[in-house]
């Protein structure tokens, strides 16, 4: 086992290449241990250099609407009147904490998505 830090994208490519050969290694073997260490190194490098931000709250709501075939009218129970729903979806009104809780509880939209970009 010759493990070294992943410092750049070329090191990352080589780590992926090595992981391919270790993918089917039986648990408890030195190869499985190497695979586990490489996965940890790859995750650390990717989190540092290619972070994934949570989605925009309004995009998260629209995505869930699309997934569940919902209309703006269906959001009234979570957000309020049709005018308020329209204002929220058109970014003219911010989500309140009450709206966020209702959207989370009712549509199972993660808090991390609904609270993204909140200052």
Image (cartoon, grey):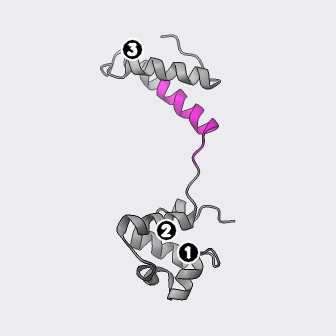
State left or right for residue 97 relative to residue 102.
Answer: right
Q: N-terminal of the two: label 2 or label 3?
A: 3
- The residue where tag 3 is placed is 30
Q: CA distance from mark 1 to mark 2?
A: 8 Å
Q: Residue at x 60, y 43 (%)?
A: 51
State left or right for residue 111 relative to residue 105.
Answer: right
Based on the displayed image, in which of its 4 quarters is residue 116 positioned?
bottom right
Q: Which residue occupies the foreground of this view, 113 or 56?
A: 56
Q: Say which element carries label 1.
A: helix
Which secondary structure is most common in the magenta stretch? Answer: helix
- What mark, if any, has residue 61 been given in the picture? 2
Using the image, determine if residue 26 lies above or below residue 51: above
Of the two numbered discs 3 and 1 in the rendering, the one whose residue sits closer to the viewer: 1
Label 1: how many Cα within 10 Å (few below 14, some 14–19, many 20+): some
- What mark, if any, has residue 24 been given in the picture? none
Q: Say which element carries label 3.
A: helix
- The residue where tag 1 is placed is 89
- Whether pointer 1 and pointer 2 mark residues with C-beta atoms closer than 8 Å, the reply is yes
Name the spot of residue 75 as percent of width and height, x first. 45, 79
Q: CA distance from mark 3 to mark 1?
A: 53 Å
Q: Which residue occupies the foreground of this view, 83 or 24?
A: 83
Using the image, determine if residue 21 lies above or below residue 81: above
Q: Quadrant of the C terminus?
A: bottom right
Name the spot of residue 61 as percent of width and height, x first. 49, 68
Q: CA distance from mark 2 to mark 3?
A: 46 Å
């Amino acid at each position: 086992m010759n493990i070294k830090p992943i410092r750049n994208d070329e090191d990352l490519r080589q780590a992926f290449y090595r992981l391919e050969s270790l993918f089917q290694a039986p648990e408890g073997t030195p190869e499985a241990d190497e695979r586990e260490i490489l996965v940890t190194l790859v995750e650390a490098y990717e989190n540092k250099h290619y972070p994934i931000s949570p989605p925009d709250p309004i995009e998260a709501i629209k995505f869930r609407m699309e997934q569940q075939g919902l209309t703006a009218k269906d959001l009234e129970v979570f957000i309020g009147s049709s005018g308020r729903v329209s204002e929220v979806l058109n970014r003219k009104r911010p989500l309140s904490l009450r709206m966020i809780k209702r959207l989370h509880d009712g549509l199972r939209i993660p808090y991390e998505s609904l609270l993204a970009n909140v200052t």
